[in-house]
Image (cartoon, rainbow, N blue to C red):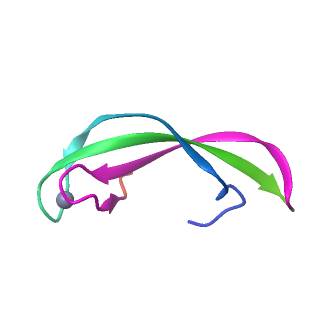
C-alpha cells in the first residue's frame, strides 16, 4: 500500500461510487487525489489516485 507516491495530496473531486460500506451500509464516495510523486526525494511528476471512503462513517474502503 505504501509507495514512493505518498507525498502531498490534493483533492481534485469526489463523486458517489457504486457499492456500499461493509460496516454501516452507507454510500461510497470516490475521491480523486493528485499526489506528488518522488523518487529518492526527487519530484518526478504527479499521479492521480482514486480512494474510496464511506460517506457516513468516513471509513477508508478498498474496492477492487
Ligand atoms: Zn460506513
| Residue 55 x, y percent position in the rendering | 23, 49
Ligand 1 positioned in quadrant = bottom left
> Horizontal placement of 16 versus 30: left or right?
left
Looking at the rendering, which quadrant does residue 44 occupy? Answer: top right
Q: Is residue 49 above or below residue 16?
A: below
Please tell me whether residue 47 belongs to the stretch shown in magenta.
Answer: yes
Q: How many marks?
A: 0
Image: 31 above or below 60 = above
| Residue at the extreme left | 25
Which region is colored magenta?
Answer: 41-61
Q: Could you tell whether 35 is left or right of 60 in the image?
A: right
What secondary structure is the magenta-colored segment mainly?
A: strand
- Where is residue 45 drawn, in percent x and y? 78, 40
| Image quadrant where residue 59 sits | bottom left
Quadrant of the rendering where the N terminus is positioned: bottom right
The quarter of the displayed image where residue 3 is located: bottom right
| Residue in the foreground of this view, choosing between 64 and 43 | 43
Say whether residue 20 is left or right of residue 37.
left
Q: Residue at x 64, y 59 (%)?
A: 6
Is 59 rendered above or below residue 48? below
- Residue at image position (16%, 65%) is 23
At 11% from the left and 55% from the top, the residue drawn is 25
Whether the magenta-drawn stretch holds residue 42 is answered as: yes
Looking at the picture, how far across and down is residue 58, in whole percent?
27, 58
Q: Can you give x and y, in whole percent of width and height, for residue 17 in the image?
A: 28, 38
Amino acid at each position: 500500500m505504501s509507495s514512493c507516491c505518498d507525498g502531498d495530496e490534493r483533492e481534485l473531486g469526489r463523486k458517489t461510487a457504486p457499492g456500499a460500506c461493509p460496516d454501516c451500509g452507507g454510500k461510497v464516495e470516490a475521491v480523486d487525489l493528485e499526489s506528488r510523486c518522488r523518487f529518492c526525494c526527487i519530484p518526478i511528476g504527479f499521479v492521480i489516485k482514486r480512494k474510496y471512503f464511506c460517506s457516513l462513517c468516513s471509513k477508508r474502503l478498498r474496492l477492487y
